[in-house]
Amino acid sequence: MDYESALAYLDEHASYDKTGRVDSPSVEPISRLASAMGDPHLAQPVIHVTGTNGKGSTVQIISRLLMAQGLTVGTYTSPHLERVNERIKRNGEPISDEEFGEVIAGIADMEAITGVRPTYFEAVTAAAFRWFADVAVDVAVIEVGMLGRWDATNIVDAQVAVVTNIALDHTEFAGPTTVDIAREKAGIIKPGSAAIIGETEPDLVQIFRDEGGATTMVRGDDFETVDNSLAIGGRALDLRTPTTIYSDVFLPLHGAHQGDNAAVALTAVETFFAAPLAEDVVHEGFANVEMPGRFEVLGVQPLTIIDGAHNPPGADVCASVFFDDFQPEGRRILIVGTLRDPGEMLAALRADEFDVVHACTAPSPRGVPGADIAKAARALGCDEVYVHDDVEAACKAAMKYADSDDAILACGSIYVAGAAREPLRRFAN
């Protein structure tokens, strides 16, 4: 199967969207597929990561620390920004088009043999497990697609299970409270798992303790970010783990929240090795972290940024980083599309503090029409608001009138960040 045929196969199997969302959650279909393939998900140890926000950054930090230690690392994330290959990586390099076509062809064969028709997310997840086994990675770092307990990735038996934090999201599938969300995310903790918990609310922490992992370590009690300072191009951190204090660690990611993600990730890797890491390994691993689409700075004149925050807590963090860490002399220009209540998202983004708002429809079946976003922006008090049919049109309009001292932020969904990346990158360069 060639690459284009593989993409066509996946599109035929897209049930709702491509993030792991299904109508009737169950790990039974992918379990049957994996069993027919010889259980490739059990071929290597796994660090499994869930949480409401910060999963992607935490996965990338973990992967880079493991690579700095000399391991061959398979990393599985979702969704992708521009190409599906980005989801499946070996030592930071995406799977090639040819290899991707081959593993998806294998999934199609298993569908014919087992009679299981996988969703888009199940097919890509199964393909990742198959490829990681084929190329013999030493360890796989796996990001949950949605929630945890019934996510397709949860057929793994994680040596280390990580929960970054808990907030309200995906409440149509688990809710209506954070307790309900926590119970679903706790499902990735297996009897032999060491659980690393970034959440600090006592009632939620107890849910993770009650899940019955081998050990549980909690941010604030067992590990923490001791110092978290703004630095040129990122953050300067002092991190305390259960064994060690690591000082003057530079992380090339923007936002104070990345300090919490860093502490969680470092503790997860220490726990995986059951030993402290050498100082040079920590500094090398952190320095090499890349996180496209997560407050990614594409240019500086004008300041041009994309961010994939997709829910109000993430949008609030995005706005805080934008307004607190960056202070452009010119206008603040917002390009925004979303998959959820635009009023909540715009309020969290502090849209009324922007000088110009370009509302657009995110490239997803669940994308809120740009006209509805514009209406919500005007209701919030935004004065200069424009409506566009798609992300690229919004980018072109924003770029046309931006001066070198302005700042452009494109956000509201990972789909918006992905669609904006190329046109804004062209403009920034």
Image: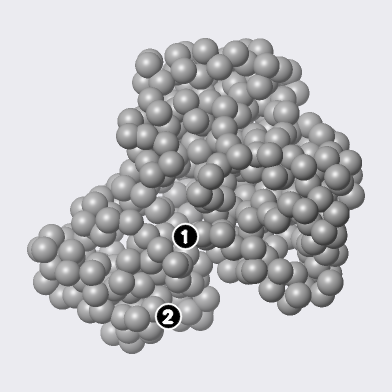
Of pointers 2 and 1, the one earlier in the residue sequence: 2
Tell me if mark 2 has few (under 14), some (14-19) or many (20+) residues whose alpha carbon lies within 10 angstroms of its own.
some
Q: Residue at x 64, y 63 (%)?
A: 13
Tell me the quarter of the picture where residue 166 sits. top left
Which label is found at residue 414?
1
Q: Amino acid at mark 1?
A: Ile
Specify whether 282 is left or right of 248.
Answer: right
Residue 172 seen in the current view: yes
Viewer-nearest residue: 49 or 8: 8
Look at 45% across and 71% down and name the residue there: 363
**Toward the viewer: 312 or 183?**
183
Image quadrant assignment for residue 57: top right
Residue tagged by mark 2? Answer: 392
Name the outermost residue toward the front: 115
Picture coordinates of residue 87, whole percent (x, y) = 66, 56
- Residue 356 image position (x, y, % from top left): 21, 72
Picture coordinates of residue 215 (x, y %)?
A: 62, 13
Helix, strand or loop at label 2? It is helix
Q: Which mark is residue 59?
A: none
The correct choice, above or below, for 190 with respect to 346 in the image is above
Q: CA distance from mark 2 to mark 1?
A: 14 Å
Q: Is residue 280 visible?
A: no
Q: Quadrant of the N terminus?
A: bottom right
Give residue 98's position: percent from left, percent from top.
Answer: 83, 69
Name the side, left or right, on which 37 lies relative to 209.
right
Res 79 quadrant in image = bottom right
| Residue at 22% from the left image edge and 60% from the top image edge | 351
Residue type at mark 2: give it: Glu
